[in-house]
Image (cartoon, grey):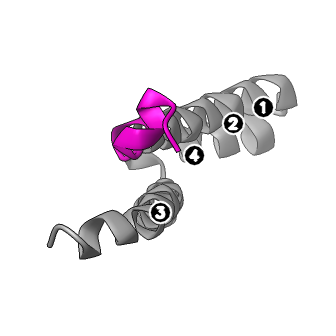
Amino acid sequence: RHVTLPLLRPSIQVALILRTILALQAFAVAQALTGRGFPLLIGETYEWYVNQQNPYVASAVGMVILVISMATAVVYLRTLRQPDVVRGAR
């Protein structure tokens, strides 16, 4: 456990980040299955772009989704960083 987990840390970081991005994409599937009765950020983006004909608001909502993805990636990277990197040792 003390040898294997530290060696798997980079793989775990990448897997967590990719799973988070895929989880945000799963909301699009829920939106497609349930229709407008289940409001989600992805659905709001689609609503503003296609039905309301306002690409500016749709891109702003898309940026909110991007910020959420980036924030969770930063949290994962900071949480799982190696202790020797924190202290600056090599």
Part of the protein shown in magenta: 78-90
Residue type, label 1: Ser
Q: Secondary structure at mark 1?
A: helix
Q: Position of residue 3 (x, y in %)?
A: 24, 72
Disc 3: which residue: 10
Q: Position of residue 22 (x, y in %)?
A: 50, 64
Q: What residue appears at the point 69 percent right and 30 percent down from the top-left corner?
A: 63
**For residue 81, above or below residue 52:** below
**As drawn, is 51 to the left or to the right of 33?**
right
- Looking at the rendered structure, the number of numbered marks drawn on it comes to 4
- Mark 1 or mark 3, earlier in chain: 3
Q: Residues within 10 Å of mark 2 (few under 14, many from 20)?
A: some
Front residue (pair 82, 30): 82
Front residue (pair 69, 34): 69
- Mark 2 or mark 4, earlier in chain: 4
Separation of marks 3 and 4 at Cα, in angstroms: 30 Å
Separation of marks 2 and 4 at Cα, in angstroms: 8 Å
Nearer mark to the viewer, of 2 and 4: 2
Decide: marks 1, 4 in contact (CB < 8 A)?
Answer: no
- Mark 3 or mark 4, earlier in chain: 3
Decide: marks 2, 1 in contact (CB < 8 A)?
Answer: yes
**As drawn, is 8 to the left or to the right of 64?**
left
Q: What residue appears at the point 47 percent right and 63 percent down from the top-left corner?
A: 10
Q: Position of residue 82 (x, y in %)?
A: 39, 46
Disc 2: which residue: 62
Q: Secondary structure at mark 3?
A: helix
Front residue (pair 46, 24): 24
Residue type, label 3: Pro
Q: Which mark is residue 42?
A: 4
Q: Which mark is residue 59?
A: 1
Q: Residues within 10 Å of mark 3 (few under 14, many from 20)?
A: some
